[in-house]
Image (cartoon, rainbow, N blue to C red):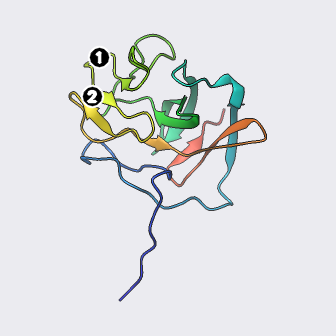
Amino acid sequence: MAQYPRFSQTSLDFSDSAVSDTASAPALADTDPKIPLCNGADMVDGGDAIPFDVVYAGQTCRAFAIRFDGKPQAYLNRCTHVAMEMDYQPNKFYDLTGQWLICATHGALYQPDTGRCAGGPCRGGLVKIQLSEFDGVVHWHTAYNLKALSF
């Protein structure tokens, strides 16, 4: 019988709106490019998000990075209820408590550390983008279906 590896929750989430919960994905190899995003000091717990553009499954999409409980997190800026951007004002994703990510259109709530649906009309979890932070810089990681936007 074949042995299958176990995957980390911090890996890129390949779920889509048909999936009922955030799924784990294969760990990224060291050869996968890491793209500098911002200085770590620019990300504050519960503060404004850092927006960036990616190519996800062949489509240009907006993404955002936030800090929650001291750790950087990133997701596609796309609600799972209706594929619309979620921020209620530019780069504003947290609810008033600073504990949930909220979709401005229909009020879906997501857990900031996992992207899982926490309430409201969401269908599955947000698409997670793996980040790493070293030498004071936050980097996002590409994957087979997640690439840097090229001009």
- 137, 142: nearer the viewer: 137
Q: Quadrant of residue 108?
A: top left
- Residue 103 left/right relative to 7: left
Residue 82 badge: 2
Residue 24 spot, x, y in % from top left: 41, 56
For the point 53% across and 46% down, the residue is: 146
Count of labels in the image: 2
Q: Is residue 140 above or below residue 25?
A: above
- The residue that label 1 is drawn on is 105
For the point 26% across and 48% down, the residue is: 19
Amino acid type, label 1: Thr
Residue 95 spot, x, y in % from top left: 38, 18
Q: Tags 2 and 1 in contact by the CB under 8 Å rule?
A: yes
Residue 109 spot, x, y in % from top left: 31, 27
Q: Is residue 59 above or below residue 25?
A: above
Callout 1 secondary element = loop
Say which quadrant the C terminus sits in. top right
Q: Is residue 31 above or below residue 58?
A: below
- 17, 4: nearer the viewer: 4
Would you call the spot at circle 1 few (<14 residues within 10 Å), some (14-19), or many (20 or more)? some
Q: Can residue 116 be seen here?
A: yes
For the point 44% across and 57% down, the residue is: 25
Amino acid type, label 2: Val
For the point 56% across and 24% down, the residue is: 51
- Residue 54 left/right relative to 100: right
> For the residues marked 2 and 1, what is the alpha-carbon distance in whole angstroms?
9 Å
Q: Earlier in the sequence, mark 2 or mark 1?
A: 2
Q: Can residue 39 be seen here?
A: no
Check the image and name the residue furthest to the left.
Answer: 121
Callout 2 secondary element = loop
- 108, 56: nearer the viewer: 108
